[in-house]
Structures are given as C-alpha cells and as structure tokens.
Amino acid sequence: MPSFLPATLHRALLPLAHRVRHRWRKLRGTPIAGVSAVLTNLQGDVLLLRHSYGPDVWALPGGGMKTGENPEDCIRREVKEELGVTLGKVDYLGTIEEQLSGSPHTAHLFAAICNARPVPDLREVEVARFFPSHSLPEPLGEVTRRRLDAWKAREIS
C-alpha cells in the first residue's frame, strides 16, 4: 500500500487489500515466501503485534519478501518500516514450510534482541507490546503459535 496515503486512509483500506490478496493467492496457488522474527527485549520478553488487517490475533513482526530479496534484509526492512527499530545481530533459525492463504509458503524465521522501544507505524501495526514468554496473550494466531514453538525448540529445518 502506498505510504503517501494518510495513515487513517491506509489503515481503512488494508482490510480490503488483505481480503483481495488472500483470495488471489488461493486462486493462483503460487508459492510465496515471507519472514517472521521473534524479538525479545533485554529481559527476554517477546514482542507481539496487533495488525490493522487480517485475523484479530497477536502476531510476530514480519512480512512478505520482495522478488529477489534476501530474507535477512527483508526482516530488517519490515521491522524498520512497521516498528521504527533498526535490528542489530539477527539469528537465522531456519524455515517452516506451510500453507498460507491457500498457497505453499516458505517462512524464514529469525530471532533478535530488540533494545529499542518499538513504535507502531499505525498503518499496518496498531499495537506492539512485550509479554513474558511464559504468559503470552490470547488469542495467538496459529501461524504465530507454530513459529514460537519452533523458536522455543530451536530445531527447524
């Protein structure tokens, strides 16, 4: 979505854009790739987000990769755009193969420490908050739950 739109209009149009993209992916079934990051603060709390579109669940930071984009560059870009945070050291945990919007999806999973206060862009991300890893809020999205399980196990392909 173009960033020249006012944030309120951008936020209002995202649910429609999300539904159209979801249906398009389902129709085409083309493989897609994206990134997610488990960001923790210095105390080990996990950063979760509420998006202005899609299911009303807590989710991890991340997004879709552009054609030819390196996964680490993508997660750095997404976190910077959506939360205003420049990541330092990023650990690559591996990939998760799944179905997303009816299409084969490769999720590249990362972990990093976030020592800055995230500021939601108020376009895609409405809320960004740290939670103790032993007391995460509900509802967590199924995708988020799988990725957190992989982060905890640190054993993904």
Image: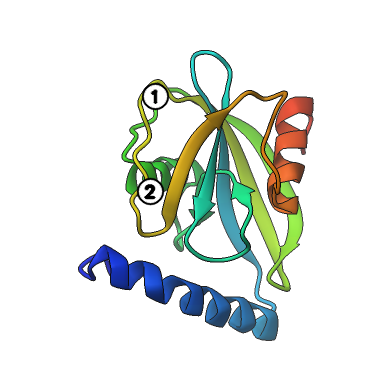
Please state the horizontal and vertical placement of residue 95, each as a whole percent of the image.
69, 44
Out of 8 and 70, give the one closest to the viewer: 8
Q: Secondary structure at mark 2?
A: helix
Q: Quick one: label 2 or label 1, which is nearer the N terminus?
A: 2
> Compared to 37, does 81 lie above or below?
below
Q: Quadrant of residue 46?
A: top right
| C-alpha distance separating marks 2 and 1 | 16 Å
Q: Residue at x 71, y 41 (%)?
A: 147
Q: Pick the quarter of the image with the N terminus.
A: bottom left
User: Tag 1: residue type?
Assistant: Gly
> Compared to 96, does 12 lie above or below?
below
Q: Secondary structure at mark 1?
A: loop
Q: Is residue 77 left or right of residue 133?
A: left
Q: Is residue 61 left or right of residue 134?
A: left
Please state the horizontal and vertical placement of residue 24, each as a whole percent of the image.
60, 83
Q: Is residue 110 left or right of residue 120?
A: right
Out of 56 and 143, give the one closest to the viewer: 56
> Compared to 8, does 134 lie above or below?
above
Q: Pick the quarter of the image with the C terminus.
A: top right
Q: Residue at x 49, y 14 (%)?
A: 42
Q: Residue at x 70, y 27 (%)?
A: 135
- Direction top: furthest residue: 43
What colouring style does the render use? rainbow
Is there any visible trace of residue 154 in the rendered image? Answer: no
Q: Residue at x 66, y 68 (%)?
A: 31
User: What residue did someone put label 1 on?
Assistant: 88
Please state the horizontal and vertical placement of residue 40, each as a whole percent of the image.
54, 25
Please state the horizontal and vertical placement of residue 77, each as a whole percent of the image.
37, 46
Question: Can you tell which of label 2 and label 1 is closer to the viewer?
Answer: 2
User: What residue did someone put label 2 on?
Assistant: 82
